[in-house]
Amino acid sequence: MRLEDLVRELRSLGRPVIIATDVNPPPEFVLKIAGVFNARLFFPEKSLPSDEKRQLAKGLKTANIHEEDAAGAALKAYHFYENKLRQVAANLAKMKKSEKLDEIRRLVLSGVSVNHALLILEEREAETVAKGSGKAEAAAKKERGGLGEYESHRKPPALAELIEANAELRKAVQRLELQNSILRERVSLLERGVYERIMRDRTMRKLDGEVRRLRAELMGRRHKRPAKHAEKQEKQSGLKILKDKIDLEGIVEEYRESDA
């Protein structure tokens, strides 16, 4: 599936707060999706083995191994944040503000503390009330022949707005730091590959030179062998002639002695 199609489908379901993957380091495709939604990225300390993903997705209907991998990654992320989500629910129950649970959970998963998340919601509610009263005041001024429009000017950002913006920036920083780390690792691998290739080429050149030297030495030995063989044959022939000569002289001497 293309990135654009997947983003469109996710937006039709809502806005993801966390994007999870089952491998470490996260694939570039996953980083792009997290960047589009500025979502928090979850990835395991080491890539999840198939057995663990199968166990995590046990009981879920998955059509293929890719869906099983996705389910395993999502459930691994859920178990990682599960304790925090329970604490949020318990705290809101004590405060008797459980109706705000979903929104508080979203903010907490984005990196905002529970207290700050409550502050954000309270300020939003106060701002909504203020806007309503402001519009009513503008309507009254219009009836009295005032400016005729609702007077508005940009207020300094509220604390809640700054807290939320800070959380969004932290998510972006986390993602950028991760991308930087992955790129550094890739550069390191490329540099290591280049170095290994250079060393391999040097070794190959050295071995090639050694092969040529041994081949030349072997050819030289082959050329010397016939000459040595001829020399050996010549020596053996001389010895035979000398032996025959010695035998002939012995026969002549025996004949002379017998004749006398």
Image (cartoon, grey):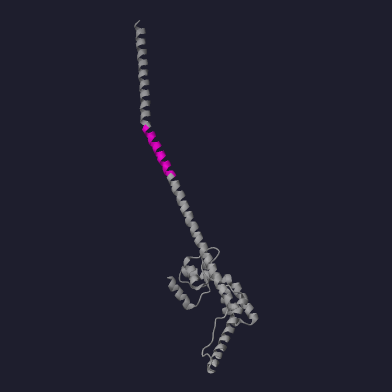
Residue placed at 45% from the left, 75% from the top? Answer: 8
Counting every numbered tag in the picture gives 0
Residue 41, how many percent across, how many down?
Answer: 53, 69
Of 14 and 150, nearer the camera is: 150
| Residue 157 placement (x, y as % from top left) | 57, 78
Residue drawn at point x = 43 percent, y = 45 percent: 205
- Tell me if residue 212 comes above or below residue 182 in the rendering: above
Specify the quadrant of the image occupied by residue 244: top left
**Looking at the image, which residue sits at the far right?**
94
Q: Start and end of the magenta stretch?
A: 206-223
- Residue 220 lies in the magenta stretch: yes
Left or right: 254 with respect to 156?
left
Q: Position of residue 26 (x, y in %)?
A: 50, 65
Asked if one can make out residue 85 in the rendered structure from this viewpoint, the answer is yes
Q: Is residue 58 visible?
A: no
Q: Main secondary structure of the magenta part?
A: helix
Q: Nearer the viewer, residue 177 or 226?
A: 177
From this view, report whether residue 76 is shown above or below residue 220: below
**Side of 92 where 29 appears, left or right:** left
